[in-house]
Image (cartoon, grey):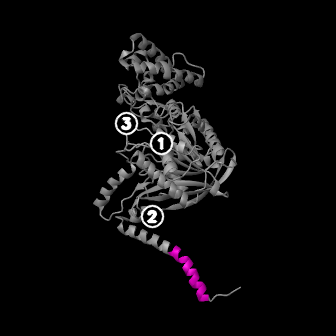
């Protein structure tokens, strides 16, 4: 072999390493520049990405699984990254199965909704390796709370990334300024870059792109799992990833869906002339009344009863609502009687409401004879009326019953076991108001002055990638996002008929947070794991 002078070998090695050294020096230089511009030590710490790694094990339905957990942040930047302008620090907790080929293992990004909610709910209640134990449909007693092995963690089917939305959890908006007043003004403006339908989705798209690069997961099967407003986000995000970043998704899992806000059962009274929400909420009213034994003719089984109510909602009830003031008195009386049979509400009350009872009224009125308010997120829950004379519910008994357990358990878990956040406050909900609800549908030149509707976004994503599969899940007792409204939305997606075969449905005898009911948690785990197994393209 030909030998080279030692000095030449050193020079050659230096030449090869120079680009890496230069890049590292450049990154350090940028970091120092930003730190020097930061107003405080806390701000300087936030602009640096952070990762804390721990290890653990979980037993999932009797099978042990070892994992690596990373609690950390990814820094988002403006459109021109050369300007060294970090815009947000996004907190995530990632769980990776150990001793496997991670490049081919499915990867699921999970987030709650709000908008402005942290992802404490899905993390501690559904699919993380630890689960907080709460009572099934009663108020969980105060601390200490029990944190248990999660027998139904989704780690057996996919690596998991729980993401806190900008401004929520440990995620923070950033404004690097020395001057305090300038920083506060910049932060106020910064909110406009994140707090809106399209702005929020773009932030998540950037986060996902950076995460895939940082962890070398571009070739992994990819899934989105959103709950509540997280389903709205998923529709916009799926379209952005598919059409703008050429990131094909294997699947989108939607829990407690709302894509068209004209179907929001909480506020149809402010949208007269658009009566669809009343009809689509009726099956959930019926399910909740059935659960509390408030029906004059109690059906033996829930599902056949709901099929009957769904048929009535789309036919006789919808026609009666559409008639408006031309509805004949006898016909109105007949519809009111049928609504009484399906909801348990008094006929006189239904007649006075002109056949239109919105969710807040139903929650307040269903158990009024017992001075109880019915749960919004989960109609199985009940709590004392705040004021018996109120027209509608003034609080949600389910939120009151379980929120402390989730928040307390996570704050303890993230600090003790994940070793993150000792010096930071965890914001369960971010201050995201005012939220920009204007949305620019695909193909439109500007946002439309109508209620937010992201059905076109999901439809475009499915047409752009005809192999994209969707799993719609929800609870029969969810009064916040009624299950039949979600079914209606999927049936009306502007997609070819053959793409409807890409949509699967699974509903459970639980509420908005399906996983708060252990039997339903087991079922949704099995359904989602099965969905991932069918669509990850291994062996297909």
Q: Looking at the picture, how far across and down is residue 74, in whole percent?
A: 48, 58
Q: Is residue 274 above or below residue 117?
A: above
The quarter of the picture where residue 323 lies is top left
Q: Is residue 37 above or below residue 148?
A: below
The foreground one among 87 and 464 is: 464
Q: Residue at x 44, y 27 (%)?
A: 276
Q: Secondary structure at mark 2?
A: loop
CA distance separating discs 1 and 2: 34 Å
Give the label, 3 or 2, closer to the camera.
3
Q: Is residue 452 above or below residue 244?
A: above
Residue linked to disc 3: 450
**Disc number at residue 457?**
1
Answer with mark 3 or mark 1, whichever residue precedes in sequence: 3
Q: Which portion, as a residue range, is magenta?
A: 6-21
Overall secondary structure of the magenta stretch? helix
Residue linked to disc 2: 48
Q: Residue at x 35, y 54 (%)?
A: 190
CA distance separating discs 3 and 2: 40 Å
Q: Secondary structure at mark 1?
A: helix
Asked whether the viewer can see residue 218, the reply is yes
CA distance separating discs 3 and 1: 15 Å
Residues marked 3 and 2 touching at CB (< 8 Å): no
Q: Looking at the picture, how far across and down is residue 302, in whole percent?
A: 58, 24
Would you call the spot at circle 2 few (<14 residues within 10 Å), some (14-19), or many (20 or more)?
some
The foreground one among 253 and 240 is: 240
């Amino acid at each position: 072999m030909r030998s080279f002078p030692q000095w030449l070998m050193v020079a050659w090695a230096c030449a090869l390493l120079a680009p890496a050294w230069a890049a590292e020096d450049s990154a350090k230089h940028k970091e120092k520049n930003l730190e020097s511009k930061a107003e405080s030590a806390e701000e300087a710490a936030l602009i640096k990405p952070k990762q804390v790694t721990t290890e653990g094990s979980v037993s999932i339905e009797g099978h042990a699984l070892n994992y690596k957990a990373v609690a950390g942040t990814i820094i988002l930047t403006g459109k021109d990254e050369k300007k060294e302008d970090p815009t947000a620090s996004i907190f995530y907790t990632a769980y990776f199965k150990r001793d496997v080929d991670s490049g081919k293992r499915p990867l699921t990004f999970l987030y709650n909704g709000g908008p402005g909610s942290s992802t404490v709910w899905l993390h501690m209640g559904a699919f993380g390796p630890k689960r907080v134990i709460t009572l099934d449909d009663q108020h969980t007693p105060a601390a200490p709370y029990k944190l248990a092995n999660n027998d139904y963690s989704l780690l057996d089917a996919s690596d998991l990334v729980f993401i806190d939305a900008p401004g929520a959890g440990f995620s923070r908006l950033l404004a690097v300024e020395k001057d305090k007043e300038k920083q506060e003004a910049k932060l106020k403006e910064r909110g406009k870059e994140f707090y809106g339908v399209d702005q929020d989705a773009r932030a998540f798209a950037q986060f996902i792109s950076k995460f895939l690069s940082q962890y070398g997961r571009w070739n992994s099967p990819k899934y989105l799992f959103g709950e509540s407003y997280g389903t709205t986000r998923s529709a916009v995000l799926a379209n952005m990833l598919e059409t703008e970043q050429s990131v094909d998704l294997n699947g989108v899992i939607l829990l407690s869906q709302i894509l068209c806000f004209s179907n929001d059962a909480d506020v149809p009274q402010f949208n007269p002339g658009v009566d669809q929400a009343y009809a689509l909420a009726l099956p959930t009213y019926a399910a909740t009344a059935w659960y509390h034994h408030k029906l004059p003719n109690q059906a033996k089984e829930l599902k056949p009863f709901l099929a009957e109510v769904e048929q009535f909602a789309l036919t006789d009830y919808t026609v009666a609502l559409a008639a408006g003031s031309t509805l004949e008195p006898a016909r109105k009386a007949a519809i009111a009687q049928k609504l009484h049979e399906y909801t348990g509400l008094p006929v006189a009350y239904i007649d006075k409401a002109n056949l239109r009872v919105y969710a807040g009224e139903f929650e307040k009125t269903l158990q009024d004879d017992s001075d109880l308010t019915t749960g919004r997120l989960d109609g199985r829950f009940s709590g004392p009326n705040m004021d018996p004379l109120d027209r509608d519910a003034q609080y949600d008994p389910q939120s009151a019953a379980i929120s402390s357990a989730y928040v307390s358990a996570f704050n303890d878990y993230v600090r003790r076991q994940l070793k993150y956040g000792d010096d930071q406050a965890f914001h369960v909900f971010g201050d995201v108001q005012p939220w920009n609800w204007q949305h620019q549908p695909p193909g439109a030149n500007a946002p439309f002055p109508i209620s937010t509707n992201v059905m076109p976004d999901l439809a475009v994503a499915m047409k752009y990638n005809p192999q994209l599969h969707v799993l719609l899940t929800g609870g029969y007792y969810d009064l916040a996002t009624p299950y039949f409204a979600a079914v209606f939305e999927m049936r009306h997606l502007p997609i070819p008929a053959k793409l409807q075969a890409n949509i699967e449905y699974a509903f459970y005898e639980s509420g908005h947070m399906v996983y708060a009911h252990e039997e339903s948690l087991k079922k949704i785990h099995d359904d989602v794991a099965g969905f991932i197994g069918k669509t990850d393209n291994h062996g297909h």
